[in-house]
Image (tube, rainbow, N blue to C red):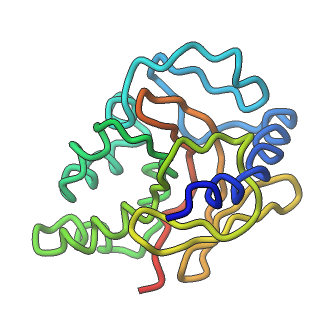
């Protein structure tokens, strides 16, 4: 993967994040970790003290994501040194999947499919809002999604053509960064 291209594929999120912050946008997920979230002034944030999994585990809005990460066997990976950028769906995003989809994915026999879907939400490196531009982005599962900006909001279009809105940016972790999205991303195949 070309990390430089990934970073180049990410400055629009900064614009979107700043516009979201300036417009007083509220998040669908609150960050209960010690990491502060402020897209408009990332330099003012205190240093992160928890990794991605610890932050997600400490936030009730990510309980479904954490259960899925555990079922897929990705806890050690996402607790590792990284760095990773995770586009984290909220519980509400998982609840919007067709009935029975999540239950099916959480079954042990579907571990590979679940792992593929979850790694589709991860990009190598720490990509903060200020580094985001519209374009195609390679995920760690080898598939791509597309970042776009519409009326000051930043969206990700997945392999199935569905859009997820980035609703909160720059939750700093010791091994990367989390951006909160309002839908589950699905790779093309």
Query: Residue 56: horizontal and vertical position, in percent?
Result: 38, 36
Q: Residue furthest left?
A: 108
Asked whether 75 or 152 is in front, the reply is 75
Q: Tell whether 128 sits left or right of 62.
A: right
Count up the numbered dots.
0
Q: Residue at x 46, y 77 (%)?
A: 187
Answer with the quarter of the image where residue 148 lies.
Answer: bottom right
Q: Quadrant of the C terminus?
A: bottom left
Residue 127 x/y as whole percent? 60, 44
Q: Is residue 64 above or below residue 30?
A: below
Query: Which of 10 and 55 lies nearest the eye of the viewer?
Result: 10
Point out the residue furthest to the bottom here: 189
| Closer-to-camera residue (74/62) | 74
Residue 56 shown left or right of residue 106 in the figure: right
Image point 43% across, 72% down: which residue?
A: 142
Q: Which of 157 and 95 lies nearest the eye of the viewer?
A: 157
Return the x and y of residue 137 as percentages of the image width and height. Answer: 60, 66
Q: Is residue 135 above or below residue 179?
A: below
Residue sitting at x 42%, y 27%: 174
The picture places residue 21, in percent across and down from the top left corner, at 79, 34
Give above or below for 131 relative to 119. Answer: above
Q: Is 147 placed left or right of 74 in the picture?
A: right
Q: Is residue 132 left or right of 140 when viewed as pictured?
A: right
Going 52% across and 15% down the picture, which residue do you hit?
47
């Amino acid at each position: 993967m070309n990390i430089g291209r990934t970073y180049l594929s990410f400055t629009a999120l900064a614009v979107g994040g700043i516009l979201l912050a300036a417009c007083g946008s509220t998040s669908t997920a609150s960050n209960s970790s010690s990491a502060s979230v402020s897209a408009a002034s990332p330099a003012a944030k205190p240093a992160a003290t928890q990794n991605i999994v610890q932050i997600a585990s400490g936030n009730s809005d990510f309980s479904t994501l954490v259960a899925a990460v555990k079922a897929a066997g990705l806890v050690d990976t996402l607790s590792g040194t990284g760095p990773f950028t995770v586009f984290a769906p909220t519980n509400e995003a998982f609840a919007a999947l067709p009935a029975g989809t999540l239950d099916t994915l959480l079954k042990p026999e579907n571990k590979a499919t679940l792992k593929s879907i979850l790694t589709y939400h991860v990009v190598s490196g720490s990509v903060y809002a200020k580094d985001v531009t519209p374009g195609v982005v390679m995920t760690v599962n080898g598939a791509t999604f597309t970042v776009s900006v519409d009326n000051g909001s930043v969206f990700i279009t997945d392999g199935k053509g569905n859009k997820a809105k980035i609703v909160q940016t720059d939750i700093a972790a010791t091994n990367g960064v989390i951006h909160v999205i309002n839908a589950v991303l699905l790779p093309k195949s």
